[in-house]
Image (spheres, helix red, strand yellow):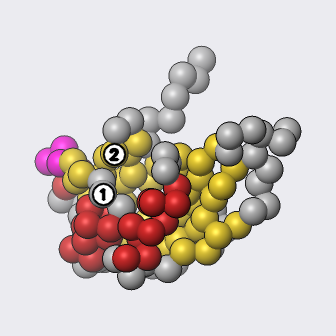
Amino acid sequence: MLTAVDHVQLAAPPGSEDTLRAYYVDILGMTEIPKPPTLAVRGGCWFRAGAVQLHLGIESDFRPAKKAHPGLRVTGIEAYAARLVAREAAIIWDDGLPGYRRFYSEDPVGNRLEFLEPALSRQW
């Protein structure tokens, strides 16, 4: 029986770890968590915010996914969007999901990220 999503893994190009750290820690406000030594030798980095974990793994022939993405639930979506914009991260608001406020952004290597918050009254 499935009980929860443990983490989401995204891909990144070799040598991008410092750029990823700047984005996921400084812009999104996540905390970097250490990778086990047996996995750390592969490169990449892992991040956490509360129960949410994002793992960035290195792919030598990296191409960012333009459709696939994690959907990250936030509280105070307007303030969170303002945080990203103030740190020069582009966002695109989307009203296509009834009952939610949401926007999209991309990390520095082009991975698509969705940020969403339930509206006060859902329409479905």
Q: Which residue is mark 1?
A: 29
Is any part of residue 124 visible from this angle?
yes
Q: Position of residue 66 (x, y in %)?
A: 62, 73
Along the line of sight, which residue is nearer the eye, 43 or 84?
A: 84
103 drawn magenta = no
Q: Residue at image x 50%, y 73%?
A: 106
User: How many numbered discs sit on the rendered protein?
Assistant: 2
Kind of residue at disc 2: Ala
Q: Position of residue 6 (x, y in %)?
A: 44, 35
- Point out the image quarter for the N terminus: top right
Q: Position of residue 27 (x, y in %)?
A: 32, 67
Q: Is residue 119 left or right of residue 29?
A: right
Q: Quadrant of residue 69?
A: bottom right
**Going by the picture, which residue comes out furthest to the left?**
37
Q: Secondary structure at mark 1?
A: loop
Q: Which residues are magenta?
A: 34-38
Q: Residue at image x 49%, y 46%?
A: 75
36 drawn magenta = yes
Query: Of callouts 2 and 1, which one flags the residue occurring earlier in the amino acid sequence?
Result: 1
Mark 2 closeness class: few <14, some 14–19, many ≥20 residues within 10 Å: some
Q: Residue at image x 26%, y 66%?
A: 26
Q: Position of residue 88 (x, y in %)?
A: 39, 82
Q: Secondary structure at mark 2?
A: strand
Q: Which residue is mark 2?
A: 49
- Point out the image quarter for the C terminus: top right
By secondary structure, the bulk of the magenta-drawn segment is best described as loop
Distance (Cα) linking label 2 and label 1? 8 Å
Q: Is residue 37 left or right of residue 10?
A: left
